[in-house]
């Protein structure tokens, strides 16, 4: 039997309890004890991956180095653990069925009836174990999306039951995350929803080993005892997960509750070393005691759901903290911006970020925001669509091509300065077909981007179909916008800058996917540095007047 330990994390009572954060926090604690850990997410929905989902459905689509379009929880895993995840770390019901149906069409079942049990559950288990077979891990943590009791989760829960049985109690355990609501009128914390949720798990044949209880208030001993008694767990396996000031407090809160120790005890392991969370605690200390405060406008069309820009928001936290700076993100809906009335909306900002996105809606607002940043010399970062709109704005207002556009928005433009990549033209299917994942980029000396990274060759993740149309490159260079980062194989323009502007950078790639708590992204650090000096200069000017 393999020596890998498997931890399954299920959820009950409601969604949005933060299973991903709890899983990532436990992983962090185990990692800080010297173990090698990975996390995977199994989602019960039928989409093959979240790539085709509107961000309002499940928040941001996260992209891995190997070009998987995944659930945003993978972003948390990477940010907490400082590891790279891959295609194998996110599996959906859709993918499981797709695999089984293609096998069936190939005749691989040799005339057998193909059924949920055993074929679907076997395929789920095969995927539970896959990561552990390809790399050397001490722990594989598997987060099961959704709630127990959901019809669509049933095959996953059954597969967890089987896996737990096959692996044995020393090699696998189940952590159930649940909610202990506080009833204001009764002035009490209530355990009944948790009891019911655990009953539901028991009906599926799973006895959870550890309960992690989300709560607004501390769990008193009598509540812990009650939960232990009615859910058949030992009292030290009732873990309080109290609402935290920041998600980055959760590993320390879980450590205080001894979640890591109980896990090790149950799996008969001893720590590889004394737990070392120095750099994590150092980060939290800096995060909570900022010396600078700046405001950055984030212009996008999904701003009503902050999760749609999760990685960008977290990147600001990591890079800001590194610079002792609290970044206040001002969320601005691109449809609310109109060129003639833009100044009052953007005036107080120390920097402007135009976000990634797709389609026509809100595009004029994005272009107007770029124009404002360019003309007012406000530090600017455009990511993917944001970079493309910086190019369109420059073409329209500096080069004087009034109908310049991306062919995504205007296929008939006489100046298609952003156009569909050649390789995309024959693509018919929408799912998983963009230019995805990590590609090389070479940076030009003497530029803001090179100064930010401090090196020439970088590799960043992508998710797009359109690109800078290099037929116009010479015009742009003459007009004052430079291509300062190029893909060495295809010559695709990855970065544009305006050298006359103090800090104006557009990137075709997504730096936000590679920012980590303990390794802030250099481009965000560079951007925030520019914003801090803009803000200090502004204050100086005000004092001098
Ligand atoms: N819609 C643009 C493209 O496909 C930008 C994509 C993005 O911002 N991720 O190229």
Image (tube, grey):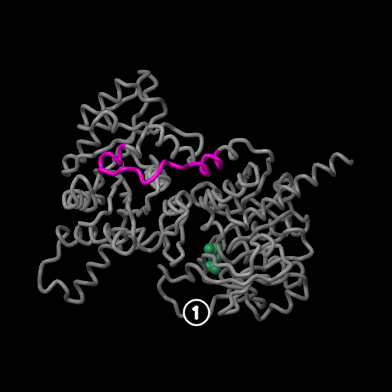
Marks counted in the figure total 1
Q: Residue at x 39, y 42 (%)?
A: 22
| Placement of 529 over or under 404, stated as above or below | above
SS class, disc 1: helix
Query: Of residues 478 and 68, which is closer to you in this image?
Result: 68
> Can residue 403 be seen in the rendering of this structure?
no
| Placement of 180 over or under 81, stated as above or below | above
Q: Is residue 312 left or right of residue 125?
A: right
| Placement of 336 over or under 460, stated as above or below | above
Q: Which segment is the magenta one?
A: 262-284
Task: Indicate the quadrant of ligand 1 in the picture.
Answer: bottom right
Query: Of residues 350 and 386, which is closer to you in this image?
Result: 350
Q: Is residue 118 left or right of residue 391?
A: left
Looking at the picture, how far across and down is residue 14, in whole percent?
33, 39
Looking at the picture, how far across and down is residue 158, in whole percent?
19, 50
Q: Quadrant of the C terminus?
A: top right
Task: Assess whether residue 271 is covered by the magenta stretch.
Answer: yes
The residue under label 1 is 423
Q: Quadrant of the N terminus?
A: bottom left
Residue found farthest to the right: 545
């Amino acid at each position: 039997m393999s020596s890998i330990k498997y931890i399954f994390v299920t959820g009950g009572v409601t969604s949005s309890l933060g299973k991903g954060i709890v899983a990532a926090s436990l992983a962090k604690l185990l990692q800080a004890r010297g173990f090698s850990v990975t996390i995977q997410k199994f989602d019960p929905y039928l989409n093959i991956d979240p790539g085709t989902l509107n961000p309002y459905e499940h928040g941001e689509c996260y992209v891995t180095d190997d070009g998987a379009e995944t659930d945003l929880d993978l972003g948390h895993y990477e940010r907490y653990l400082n590891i790279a995840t891959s295609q194998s770390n996110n599996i959906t019901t859709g993918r499981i069925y797709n695999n089984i149906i293609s096998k069936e069409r190939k005749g691989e079942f040799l005339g057998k009836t193909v059924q949920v049990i055993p074929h679907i559950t076997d395929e789920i288990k095969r995927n539970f174990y896959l990561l552990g077979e390809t790399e050397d891990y001490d722990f594989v943590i598997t987060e099961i999306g959704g709630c127990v009791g959901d019809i669509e989760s049933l095959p996953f829960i059954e597969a967890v039951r089987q896996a737990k049985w096959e692996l044995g109690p020393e090699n696998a355990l189940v952590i159930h995350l649940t909610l202990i609501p506080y009833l204001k009128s009764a002035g009490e914390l209530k355990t009944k929803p948790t009891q019911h949720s655990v009953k539901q798990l028991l009906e599926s044949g799973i006895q959870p080993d550890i309960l992690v209880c989300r709560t607004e208030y501390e769990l008193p001993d009598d509540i812990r005892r009650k939960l232990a008694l009615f859910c058949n767990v030992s009292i030290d396996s009732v873990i309080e997960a109290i609402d935290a000031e920041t998600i980055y407090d959760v590993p320390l809160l879980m450590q205080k509750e001894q979640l890591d120790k109980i896990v090790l005890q149950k799996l008969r392991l001893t720590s590889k070393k004394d737990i070392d969370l120095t750099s994590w605690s150092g980060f939290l200390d800096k995060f909570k005691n900022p010396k600078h405060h700046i405001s950055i406008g984030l212009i996008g069309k999904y701003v009503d759901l902050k999760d749609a820009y999760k990685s960008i928001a977290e990147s600001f936290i990591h890079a800001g903290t590194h610079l002792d700076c609290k970044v206040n993100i001002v969320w601005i809906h691109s449809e609310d911006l109109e060129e003639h009335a833009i100044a009052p909306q953007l005036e107080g900002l120390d920097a402007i970020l135009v976000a990634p996105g797709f389609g026509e809606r809100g595009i004029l607002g994005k272009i107007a925001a770029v124009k404002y940043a360019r003309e007012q010399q406000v530090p600017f970062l455009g990511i993917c669509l944001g970079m493309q709109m910086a190019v369109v704005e420059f073409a329209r207002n500096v080069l004087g091509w009034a109908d310049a556009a991306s062919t995504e928005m205007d296929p008939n433009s006489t100046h298609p300065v952003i156009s569909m990549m050649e390789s995309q033209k024959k693509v018919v299917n929408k799912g998983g077909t963009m230019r995805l994942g990590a590609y090389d980029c070479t940076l030009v000396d003497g530029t803001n981007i090179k100064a930010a990274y401090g090196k020439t060759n970088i590799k960043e993740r992508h998710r797009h179909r359109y690109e800078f149309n290099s037929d116009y490159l010479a015009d742009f260079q003459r007009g004052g916008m430079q291509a300062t980062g190029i893909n060495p194989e295809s010559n695709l323009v990855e970065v544009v800058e305006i050298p006359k502007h103090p800090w104006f950078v557009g990137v075709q790639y997504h730096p936000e996917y590679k920012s980590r708590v303990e390794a802030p992204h250099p481009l965000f650090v560079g951007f925030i540095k520019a914003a801090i000096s803009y803000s200090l200069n502004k204050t100086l000017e005000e004092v001098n007047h």
